[in-house]
Image (spheres, helix red, strand yellow):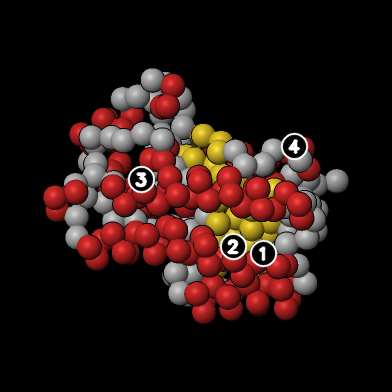
Amino acid sequence: MKSLQDKVVLISGSGGGIGSEAARRFAEQGAVVFGCDLSAENQQATVDALAADGLTLHGSGSVDLGDPEQAAQWIDDAVARFGRIDILFNNASAARFGNLEDYSVDDWYFTTRNELDNVFFSTKFAWPHIPRGGVIINMGSTAAWRGTTATGKVAHSATKGAIVAMTRQLAAEGAKRGIRAVSISPGFIKTPGTAPFIANTAVKEQLLSGVLLDRLGEPSDVISMALYLASDQASFLTGSDFVVDGGMLAT
């Protein structure tokens, strides 16, 4: 039996990077996967890639989860088709980076909208449809736990710190309903979003300087943790943040 057979899994940001890997790996474990992405083109690319391997990704783009009406519609569409939400994986995020003195108010609002508001909206509207035994997985970051001189990230650090804190509260409120809530904090992972930093040799070397395993993380490293946390094997885990960073925070 596959570990997530027939579980209804919602994955935001399934059009690329960690989200695309999540859609594939959850589907391989027997889950019914319903995704969305801000880019309809990227979402369709993931749908097609999975279909080529005999896997199914439901849902289409473009969906802007920073808009509460669109977030509610995404949830309503999933419930109308599948009746419930067993696992909500709040993966989608988009941030703007820069040092504080150059960081605009618009940059701040863009990042909080696309890394915090979107998680709140999706979770709020999904909450009534998550049954006992359900799981919420939120995407945090090592930015919640440490600063860096490699790149300015004041808003990103703030939103991801909030995600980790919000996850603890969701765990507290969900316990009486049998809902678990956990977060994953990746370190430096190779994704389309980190491509500009990887392309900058000096920034890449600085970001990797504290990684004990001396390599970039892969989306599969993060999703291996997500699959475990979503499964019944993790049934005694809630309210915690799980760091996947190659040892970065150990230095």
Give, as a three-letter code, the residue at label 4: Phe
C-alpha separation, residue under disc 2 versus residue under disc 4: 21 Å
Residue marked by disc 4: 236
Badge 1 density bin: few <14, some 14–19, many ≥20, Cα 10 Å: some
Question: Residue 55: x and y, percent?
Answer: 69, 60
C-alpha separation, residue under disc 2 versus residue under disc 3: 21 Å
Dots 3, 1 in contact, CB < 8 A: no
Q: Is residue 227 visible?
A: no
Dots 2, 3 in contact, CB < 8 A: no
Which is more N-terminal, label 4 or label 1? 1
Dots 1, 4 in contact, CB < 8 A: no
Give, as a three-letter code, the residue at label 1: Trp
Mark 2 element type: helix
Q: State the mark number for residue 127.
A: 1
Mark 1 element type: helix
Residue marked by disc 2: 123
